Amino acid sequence: MDNIKEVRRRMNVQQIREFLLDGTDGDTKNQPTVERLADLQRELGKYLKSNVQGEKTRYHIESLIYKLLDECENVFFEQGMQAGARILLGMLGLEKLSE
């Protein structure tokens, strides 16, 4: 039996995140990331439609929220890349280059 394949099969990144951030297993979803984001986008659209008067105002609020989320995604992606590079350099014994 290949242990690495078994670990990958059983790994749940959402549970790891919940454990690291909150110290619990947390409530994880089986949906792909794109579907989870699309569900929230639809929920936001419904909420704004029923609670914000005026199409122009609603559009402006939505666009600001999407810009914020897009920038958050970019920042977290960059941080993940930096962390991954540091881990890789550490594994290769080149950790002094990562400082």
Image (cartoon, helix red, strand yellow):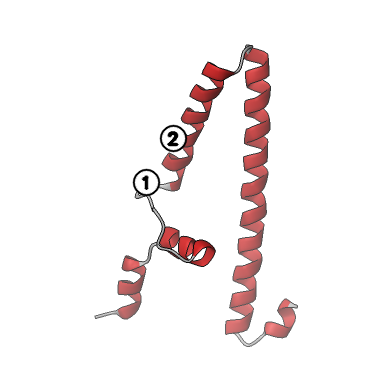
Residue extending farthest left: 1
> Of callouts 2 and 1, which one flags the residue occurring earlier in the amino acid sequence?
1
Q: Residue at x 44, y 58 (%)?
A: 14
Q: Which residue is mark 1?
A: 31
Residue type highlighted by circle 2: Asp
Task: State how far apart marks 2 and 1 are (Cα).
Answer: 10 Å
Which image quadrant for residue 98?
bottom right
Q: Quadrant of the N terminus?
A: bottom left
The local secondary structure at tag 2 comes to helix
| Residue 71 percent coordinates (x, y) | 67, 45
Q: Residue at x 61, y 56 (%)?
A: 77
Of residues 61 and 26, the one drawn nearer to the viewer in this rendering: 26
In this rendering, would 97 be left or right of 13?
right
The local secondary structure at tag 1 comes to loop
Residue 20, placed above or below residue 54: below
In this rendering, would 6 be left or right of 18?
left
Query: Label 1: few (<14), some or many (≥20) within 10 Å?
Result: few
| Residue 34 percent coordinates (x, y) | 46, 42
